[in-house]
Amino acid sequence: MSMMDFCPPQHQAIFAKRWEGWCATAGAEVVAEVEALLDEHRSPALARVFVGSDFFVQQCSRHPWWLASFLREEDCGLVAPDLEEIETEEQLEKALRDLRNRVNTEVIYRDFAGQWDIPTTCARLTRLAEVCIQTAVDWHREKMVARHGEPRSRDGDIQPMVVLGMGKLGARELNLSSDIDLIFAYPEPGQSDGEKPLENQAWFQRLGQRLIKSLDAVTADGFVFRVDMRLRPYGDSGPLVSHYAALEDYYQTQGREWERYAMIKARPVAMSGASAAEAAEELMELLRPFTYRRYIDFSVIDALREMKTLIQRQVRARGLIDNIKLGRGGIREVEFIAQAFQLIRGGREPDLRVRNILKVLPLLEEGGHLPEGAAAELRDAYLLLRRVEHGLQAEKDHQTQTLPPEIERREQLAFALGYDSWATLENALVQARAAIEREFDEVIAPPEESSEITDSDQWEFLWAGCERADDRDSWLEQLHNAGFQPAAKALEALSSLHGDRIVAALPATGRQRLDQTMPLLLAAASEVSEPLLALGRVLPLLRSILRRSAYLVLINENPPVLNQLLHLCSASPWIADLLARHPILLDEMLDQRRLLQPSTAADVADDLRQHMLRVDEDDLEAQMEALRHFKQGQSLRIAAQEVTGALPLMKVSDSLTWLAEAILQQSLTLAWQQVVEKHGEPKDASAEDMRFSIVAYGKLGGLELGHGSDLDIVFVHDADSAGYTSGERSLDAQSFYTRLAQRLIHILQTRTLSGPLYEVDTRLRPSGNSGLLVTSLSAFEKYQRESAWTWEHQALVRARPVAGSQRLGLAFEDLRTRLLCEVRDEQKLRKEVVEMRNKMRAHLDKSNDRQFDLKHGPGGIVDIEFMVQYAALAWAQGAPSIVRYTDNIRILESLSEAGLMPAHQAAHLIDAYKAYRSEGHRLALQQLPGVVSGDQFEAERKTVETTWQQMLG
């Protein structure tokens, strides 16, 4: 029979492509050997693995003889590299990576062929990690001893290092593409005994760093394991290695419940040095009292309940339906079930102190902690999920637990795992996850709620019967009495939602969640000042999350979230619209304190840095989405702080400006990395000093950004124009920086699923749209001195560097000051400023007899801005201090301080400017145009127009 006969028609194309590719690289002799080994058992297995794993095919193409050995042998074994044959660190790294790739490739084959079950594959992968860690520790320790001597205690005893494996590694449950969580420890402080001695802390820190590099670094042969050290005391801010006394002190005084939870699976996985085994045993004895109390530990129940709630919130907030690890009924929930009982009862029941979950589950059932039959049901469900997890990760050797969205890939996964179709596998997954979800919900369930009837029951009756004509009058009376006026409009909105086809099509769980939400919503809305307004603004959000009903659970289980949601949506349709478009932002409301706590510029930049650390640096799409999620979350927080009065107007603009600056800097860093990777760095440029700067104009430059504002930016550089980049695909400096700016604009403006970051306007650059996208600083100066129009000098008043090279930014600020301080003909300047103002008003002013345009109307915002710009250009040569700042308010204050404007006049203009901008912000959050009734701001307008006549009339 042909190999194709063992492959269903829908998979034959991908199989043929991969098989033919392997044959082409393997050569006729190896192909013939493999074909001779194929039979009725091996042929289907080979078809499954070629369809299911591109990683397997790639590795077998690099090492064609591997495939024959997998077919011929039942187990190719796992032998540690011979340290005597390894002379250099590069040889060590290659040996470890070759071993890792060969073992992972065999594991994939044995799994898909059905030769090894999940416990066997996990045991082999765990053993691989142990061998690689031990090999690297031994090799590096030998080199360290040769250079610095043996580390010794103050009593002269040689000190070993113990490597604790946490999580799946500790439990011998490691899977394909797993991270390994490690903690490094040594017994006592002291010093090494070599010619170049080191304190033990420094000695073992270097050893730990070298171990991590040998495992974690990505080379031409890939990596061995990604190493995660965050479970050590104090996490990333703590020392890489700790001595036993420091560990004991930390866990006794500062250890938290989640660290006890993590420590359940801890075990020594590698060690080096004299008496290492005894030291490892001593360490575990030291940690045991922290992990397991001597009594049934009911005090931990609240902490576990909180951990359980966090798990549930994360699932709801992130919409992890297809994630078989983190989603409902996933692997993490099985682990929680087992470890919760271990923490509570492990102190009194030593038999429960086992790390492997498959050994724990039957013990829990035997002890009466799980109902009869639950252990076997959970075991089978867990093994299925772990096998599917292996199948997902085998495809590309990527760390993923998310089912692919494409039906073709799902069918490939099902075939590779031995199922006849995706529908069959999906059905098995649904049943498995339902079993896990059922048991998870029962673990440390909260106390039963009171069965007494509450006022909210009336809202439940109304929602359930809002479409019944016979009860219409009673519903209208109930709504009217609760403040929903006109009541008929509220009832119409409720009936429309209740009878909507989308609601009718909801699955049972989704409908149940909606039926829980609506009475809570109506009861909470009746407590706000305008119940109907609040209801009307929140219902679009509810419609947007109906098919993602996990968000409904978030609302149902968090009354403060619902109350805050109604308050914010009542205050601003802009907020309501933002939440409806991006429901994931509901998660921001879980922490009310953080939601309403204003941030500094440093806070925003640091939050963004930490946010981006969680994203794969090689995944541009994920990075762009992460930037957008961060911006949306911060924008919601700022708007919430504004409508609740936590932030005054000036601070709102500051916060929005800081957010834009942080995102520009992060986006520029991403763009730099991408362009440099392709073309190399320009001469004398680096990531620390790109010789490139983003200059903000307009509202961003003036620190007056509003919600939804565009960014007016200009790009300058000061690289050697005759220089070229250092990469193989070299570019001249001008072309490089043009590509950099284009890539930056792409990151900012591309409409991903979450929309653009910002709309960008670069027309204020020299010569506008017809000019170069990026200008050298010298060319910028030449243009400003010889060719710029007066309005371009006006725009320069608000210009300031906001991202890129700090050195170049300072040079730009110096140039700006010199340009603004040039001597000018005041009469000519006055004429040109007035002409430009009149031209703008003719085209943009929306004022008439009944309304006033806050921005462009006579006596409005632009009049104040033009007066400030005129004053700066006309008088800066005699008073340079007036152009130190770029925002209008501080320039007006500077004019007063310099004696160029009476203090009362500057104060009146500042008050008018703040009043206009405050109203403008309020209208923006109401999604209304920036016009008001013609009888508003009469005093402010008169003040501004009078001053205009005095200065420019």
Image (cartoon, rainbow, N blue to C red):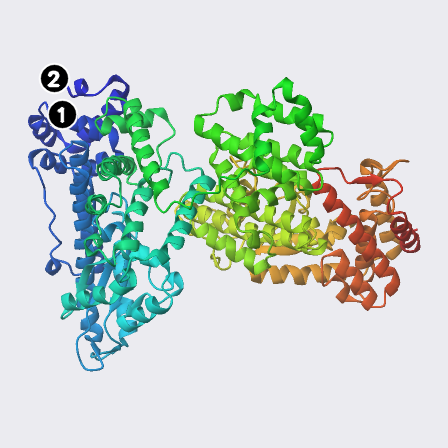
What residue lies at 59% left-to-right and 25% top-to-bottom? 497
Q: Is residue 704 left or right of residue 625?
A: right
Outermost residue, bottom direction? 155
What residue lies at 60% left-to-right and 47% top-to-bottom? 635
Mark 1 surroundings within 10 Å by alpha-carbon count, few (fewer than 14), some (14 through 19), many (20 or more): many
Q: Is residue 745 visible?
A: yes
Quarter occupied by the N terminus: top left
What residue lies at 16% left-to-right and 45% top-to-bottom? 124
Q: CA distance from mark 2 to mark 1?
A: 9 Å
Relative image position of residue 286 (x, y in whole percent) = 24, 67
Residue type for callout 1:
Ser
Q: Nearer the viewer, residue 50 or 927?
A: 927
Examine the image and state in which quarter residue 492 appears: top right
Are the residues flagged by discs 2 and 1 in contact, CB closer than 8 Å?
yes
Label number found at residue 1: 2
Disc 2 element: loop
Residue at image mark 1: 43
Residue type for callout 2:
Met
